[in-house]
Amino acid sequence: MSRSLLTLYRVDSPRLAELSAQLRETLIRDDRPALAQLLQLGAELALRVEHAPRAVDLFLVPEAEADVAPLWASLRRVAKRAALERVWTSDSPSLEGRLRAYDTLREEPEIAEAIDRLLDARFLPWFLRPVGSTGGWLKDAERSALANRMESLAPALPDEVNALVEALGGMDGDALVHDRL
């Protein structure tokens, strides 16, 4: 099993919330043309949506299924384009493991809790949670506090962790970390 790289994004929270609300409303209304437009689907995928028993059914099937994988990919592409701005990507596949288990970080409860939120997909919208992925979200104040706390530990941290600290401290706004977007 190979480890993936973590990417840090700046989140336009209002825009992501708006997109999420549009998606929810479209699925509740079972408005297939609106869903196809929202996801910017081509003719073939739009036809697949049109012929589904209900539009929501397409997102109840495991995303690895060949029939729905392109819909999930389109949804994530649209969400990324609308509300996420790539800030930084780690060049070290060991970063996630360091964040989860490095003693110096785990000994500081506030740091450990914030890191756990940054790596916990439960804090992401349902459509940004590919199976088996790592990802999480911190509000601006939490991100800033985490960067400041971790910066004070810089001499005791590995290079890959310090690179993340620098990226977190050098940005503004909400932060989302993910390994598969």
Image: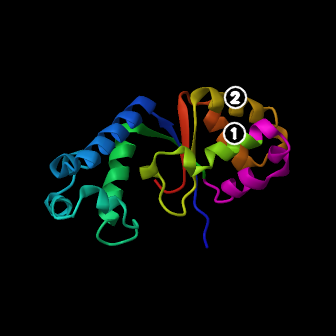
Q: Mark 1 points at which residue?
A: 114
On screen, residue 90 versus residue 82, left or right, reads right
Q: Where is residue 113 in the image (x, y as percent from the top left)?
A: 73, 41
Q: In this view, does 169 lie above or below 137?
A: above
Q: How crowded is mark 1: few (under 14 residues within 10 Å), some or many (20 or more)?
A: some
Q: Position of residue 11 (x, y in %)?
A: 47, 35
At x 61%, y 54%, the residue is: 91
Residue 73 among those drawn in magenta: no
On screen, residue 99 versus residue 14, left or right, reads right
Q: Is residue 7 above or below residue 4?
A: above
Q: CB under 8 Å between callouts 1 and 2?
A: yes
Asked where in the image residue 19 lies, by quadrant, the reply is top left
Q: Name the residue under label 2.
A: 145
Residue 104 among those drawn in magenta: yes
Q: How crowded is mark 2: few (under 14 residues within 10 Å), some or many (20 or more)?
A: some
Q: What residue type is labelled 1?
A: Ala
Q: Where is residue 39 in the image (x, y as percent from the top left)?
A: 26, 49
The quarter of the picture where the N terminus appears is: bottom right
Q: Which colour scheme is used?
A: rainbow
CA distance for labels 1 and 2: 9 Å
At x 31%, y 65%, the residue is: 68
Magenta-highlighted residues: 91-111
Q: Which of the two marks, 1 or 2, is nearer to us in this view?
A: 1
Q: Can residue 7 be seen in this view?
A: no
Mark 1 secondary-structure assignment: helix
Q: Which amino acid does label 2 sit on?
A: Ala
Asked where in the image residue 57 lies, by quadrant, the reply is bottom left
Q: In this view, does 160 lie above or below 72?
A: above
Q: Is residue 32 visible?
A: yes
